[in-house]
Image (cartoon, rainbow, N blue to C red):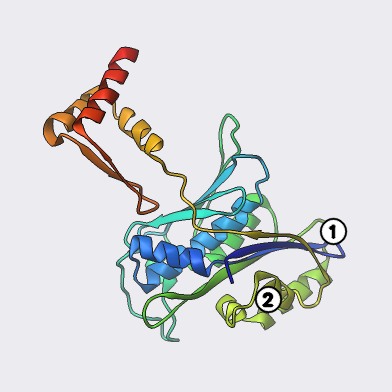
Amino acid sequence: MSDQLVRAITKDGMVKAVAVSTRDLTERARQIHRTLPVATAALGRTLAAASMMGNALKEDGASLTLRIQGGGPLGILLAVSDNQGNVRGTVDNPAVDIPLRPDGKLDVGSAVGCCGTLTVIRDLHMKDPYVGSVGLLGGEIAEDLAAYFVESEQIPTACGLGVLVDRDQSVMSAGGYIIQLLPGAGEDVIAKVEGGVMAAGSVTGLLSGNSSPEELLRQVLSDFELEILERSPIEYRCDCSRDRMERALISLGPEELKGIIDEQGGAELTCRFCDNVQTFTKAELKVLLEGIRKKI
């Protein structure tokens, strides 16, 4: 099935939840960035988290950026989501290859590192974006994200993220969930949520066999009756364009742009998020330079 986001609330009004299946978009990211398995897993988790958080922004044109810098060999992980949950992302060092954990699983925590920060930037097209940041706990991303919600937004949160990589390095399954307590939730609700999370097991296990995000939520929150609020398709989507790349060249200023013309003739720009390449000839760069000079 195609990637999907599902948002729900328990009928008692005590818990809200969102879940995603992101196999296709994680595989697309793997192909674009040529990631090895541990980078695929880390970037896939980051993309799933950003999708769920971005979809919660209902303002038109709003976006969310999730930035993880843990000091590990992967470098910086970055994911950007629109307000529908469509995402794009990058990882500094996609070719990182480290030993598996003793239990045979990919060691995402060591690859990401735990001596750094998780930063969330919400751009709601106001004067300044909202920026929240917390120290990383272990670099596994899901527990770090749960800590962010508790510390930065004071929302008790359970988060699960997972990416299962096949022997040929392609993505078999990927996705995640975010479950949050609403005001008034008592100890009995907390106990049921914690019990459900423990009993449900890993995200990749829940999503195996082509299960949907809705089925994932119903398993994790099996002690609750759920009301489904939203079902939306999501995808890996980059909003780059030739016009944006032109503006990037203009932003260099007249001296640097003239230097490119004199030294290289033309220019070839590649989007950092996707495999879109735009070529600008010497004549096209001269037109841009003239445009800058007329405004000075």
For residue 175, what is the image quadrant? bottom right
Q: Nearer the viewer, mark 2 or mark 1?
A: 2
Q: Secondary structure at mark 1?
A: loop
Location of residue 35 in the rendering, given as x and y in whole percent from the top left corner: 35, 67
For residue 295, what is the image quadrant? top left
Residue at 41% of width from left, 68% of height from top?
40
Disc 1 residue type?
Gly
Residue 290 vs residue 101, the one in the foreground = 290
Residue at 44% of width from left, 70% of height from top?
41
Residue at the farthest bottom position? 103
Q: Is 199 rendered above or below residue 93?
A: below
Mark 1 sits on what residue? 184
Location of residue 166 in the rendering, given as x and y in whole percent from the top left corner: 42, 80
Disc 2 residue type?
Val
Q: Is 92 rendered above or below residue 163?
A: above
- Residue 197 marker: 2
Location of residue 237 in the rendering, given as x and y in whole percent from the top left corner: 49, 53
Residue at 49% of width from left, 63% of height from top?
25
Q: Quadrant of the N terminus?
A: bottom right
- Report whether 248 appears left or right of 264: right
